[in-house]
Image: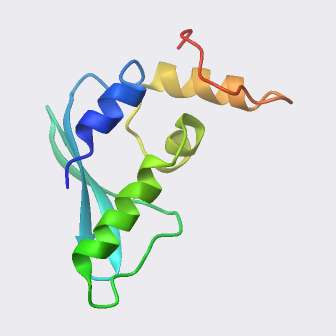
């Protein structure tokens, strides 16, 4: 299930420019992000609490996609490598202040 348009619309200024697709892949009781880039295909485990299929792969994939969509930019730099190093550093610096921002600023 492709999530690329979601990531591009919500986090486009942070995304690595070589990424051409981001898809959620459900493998039985495991879930991963399949990242397609100029250097090939990567499978990244998503180390967050996800739904297990219990016999319903499509339903689990939909719930897991919603869970991934609920992550903010700080969550994503902790569990993926989707953003550029400069963007990830800027996000970390903003969020690791005593009062995390309520919305990302355009400085990254």
Taking the image as shown, residue 46 lies to the left or right of residue 107, namely: left
The image shows residue 52, relative to residue 42, as above or below, that is below
**One can see residue 108 in this view:** yes
Q: Picture coordinates of residue 3 (x, y %)?
A: 27, 45
Taking the image as shown, residue 49 lies to the left or right of residue 34, namely: right
Q: Picture coordinates of residue 13 (x, y %)?
A: 39, 18
Q: Residue at x 49, y 63 (%)?
A: 47
Q: Picture coordinates of residue 50 (x, y %)?
A: 46, 70
For the residue pair 23 and 67, the one nearer the viewer reads as: 67
Q: Picture coordinates of residue 43 (x, y %)?
A: 26, 56
Q: Quadrant of the N terminus?
A: bottom left
The image shows residue 43, relative to residue 51, as above or below, that is above
**One can see residue 15 in this view:** no
The image shows residue 31, relative to residue 95, as above or below, that is below
Q: Residue at x 23, y 73 (%)?
A: 58
Q: Residue at x 59, y 14 (%)?
A: 105
The image shows residue 63, relative to residue 34, as above or below, that is below
For the residue pair 37 and 67, the one nearer the viewer reads as: 67
Q: Which residue is drawn at 43% across and 60% down?
A: 46
């Amino acid at each position: 299930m492709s999530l690329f348009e979601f990531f591009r619309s919500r986090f486009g200024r942070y995304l690595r420019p070589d990424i051409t697709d981001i898809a959620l892949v459900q493998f039985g009781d495991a879930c991963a992000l399949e990242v397609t880039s100029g250097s090939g295909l990567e499978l990244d485990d998503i180390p967050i609490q996800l739904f297990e299929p219990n016999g319903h792969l499509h339903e689990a994939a939909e719930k897991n996609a919603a869970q991934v969509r609920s992550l903010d930019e700080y969550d994503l730099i902790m569990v993926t490598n989707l953003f550029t190093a400069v963007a990830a550093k800027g996000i970390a610096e903003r969020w690791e202040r005593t009062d995390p921002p309520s919305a990302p600023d355009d400085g990254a």
